[in-house]
Amino acid sequence: MTWVNDVIQGIMLGGFYGMLACGLALMFGLMRIINLAHGDIAVLGAYLIYVVLQHWNTSPFVAILPVLPVMLLLGYLLQRLLLERSLRSGLLVPLLTTFGLSIVIQNLLQQGFSPDVRSLGAQAGSVATASWQITSQLSISAIGALTLGVAIVIFGGLQLFLSRTGPGRQMRATAQDPDTAELVGINSKAVYARATAIAVAIAAIGGMFLAIRSDFYPYSGPTYLIFAFEAVVIGGLGGSLWATLLGGIVLGIAQTIGGQINPEYPVLAGHIVFLLVLLSPRGGLVNLRRVSA
Amino acid sequence: MSLLELEQLKLRHGLLEAVRDLTLSIEEGETVALVGANGAGKTTLLRAIAGAHRPSAGRIGFDGADITRVPAYRRVQMGIALVPEGRRLFPALTVEENLLVAAQRRRPGRWSVDTVIEAFPMLARLRGQRAATLSGGEQQAAAIGRALMTNPRLLLLDEVSLGLAPLAVEDVYRSLDNVIAEGATVILVEQDLTRAAAVADRVVCMLEGRLVLEGAGSELTREQITEAYFGLRAKPEVQA
């Protein structure tokens, strides 16, 4: 029964990782940019929610509402001012740009908010602590269920946007062949900026759950970037969006089962599954080759 | 005033000069066949007109406006559409999606998914299929349809018969004849000289980035074109 519990906890944790990985996968799938600042952007989102909560006594779930448009705008500007210029010089330059951006965000957060560890769990109220006891061995936390639910809504919404709407169609066409997309009237730079705006806003939602589930400080980003990156690779680079959520869930299950074997193992177990997928002939490696071709 | 005016156009691929000081004008309603050996600069020229290749010197005028620096997607809105070499459909999008994606920023006009399918009946049963699963001829029809969806004033066709079975070529050209008959302005690159001369009002032959022969499709003899095509005579009839 503990194993069943582990898998269920792992699935819910996977929803969290999937949420963090979503924007990363979107930007990689569309522009082949690996955004090394993605974790820090999520943490930045958490800090912005923290700022709102200092002026307005409410729950983080409400405080994120004014933060989302700010993040959309920041994402749009990030693409237009930094990444668009970097992309002109090949695929490696954006990698360096986002690496630098990561350091800048961390240091600005430290400057502005001190290195103190914070959490928004207390402000989230009973959602952060409540749980349903199914059996003596099996309980489902409210925040875990909510995380997974929100992740499914985000992935489903994004999938619907991509497959059903005009701008989504433009995004898919640009991802497949940016040169030809321009020739049928698509402004690929505008498409890229829109996608980065969406990716950054979704990262902020991930940042909110990070801040409620656990604690954060200015240098939290890279740890979560690694988990998000592993989720994307396990799902298969450049594959479908749902595969990324699935990758997050596989990572989450690996971590909870690893933790069951030995409390010191969760992160290690996640890394091992990631490496196994990367090394498997039909796993991530195949996709990596296809992408670079 | 001509619809399209190229003045002293110079196009480069790195150090290679693909098109050298080319001057050419195309009138509204005209059908021009661009012929020449591989590497003569035909594809580069079409891509430059469509905005996918930035000229290193010279000027491109369209409908009286200087569009030399206008990006490709804006030229689509102005009425220039290219059917690229190799068709270049979006492979994971369905045929219908490939058509719709081009309709986002189009000019007003008669082309829609339904009228394109009317013009290319073979696409009717393929509407919901992914473009990657289509045969060469079907892909070509979809690619031309996609360009038509923007309601172009100037349609650029790059090697529409390349890699197609003879019957598929017949199909594609039969549908194209209707488009041309409606008065569209067309520049087409075609390797089949007989077909090029039959379809076009004017044949323009390029050799190593220069314009070497130009004349009405009905007046030029096959020998004249062949000579210009291979550069057999050092005396070009038209110096650009």
Image (tube, helix red, strand yellow):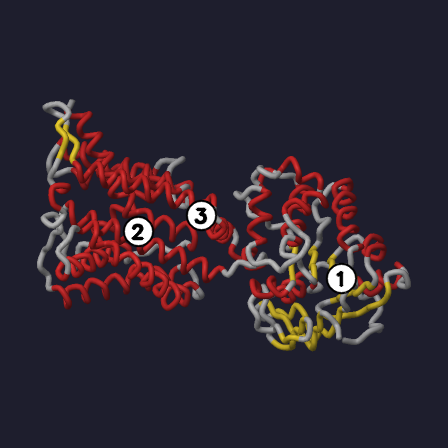
Q: Chain of mark 2?
A: A
Is mark 1 in CB contact (under 8 Å) with mark 3? no
Does residue A42 lie above or below A256 as drawn?
A: below
Quarter of the view holding residue B46: bottom right
Q: Position of residue A57 (x, y in %)?
A: 12, 56
Q: Position of residue B215 (x, y in %)?
A: 85, 67
Does residue A146 lie above or below A52 as drawn?
A: above
Question: Which amino acid lies under the numbered mark 2 shown in the image of this protein?
Answer: Ile
Q: Position of residue B121 (x, y in %)?
A: 71, 40
Which residue appears at 15% of the width and 41% of the height? Answer: A127
Q: Is residue A293 visible?
A: no
What residue occupies the far front of the structure in this picture?
Answer: A57
The answer for how far apart the CA atoms under marks 2 and 1 are is: 50 Å
Reading the image, the residue beneath label 1 is B34
Q: How dense is the environment of label 3, judged by Cα within 10 Å: few (below 14), some, or many (20 and up)?
A: few
Which residue appears at 28% of the width and 52% of the height? Answer: A203
From the viewer's perspective, is the residue at label 2 or at label 3 nearer? 2
What is the number of the mark on residue B47? none
Q: Position of residue A165 (x, y in %)?
A: 47, 48
Q: Is residue A196 visible?
A: yes
State which quarter of the image contains the N terminus of chain A. top left
- Please name whichever residue, B40 or A201, is drawn nearer the observer in this view of the structure: A201
Q: Chain of mark 1?
A: B
- Please name whichever residue, A167 or A56, is drawn nearer the observer in this view of the structure: A56
Reading the image, the residue beneath label 3 is A291
What is the number of the mark on residue A202? 2
A228 sits left or right of A129 in the view: right
Q: Chain of mark 3?
A: A
- Same chain for labels 2 and 3? Say yes or no: yes
Element under label 2? helix
The answer for how far apart the CA atoms under marks 1 and 3 are is: 36 Å
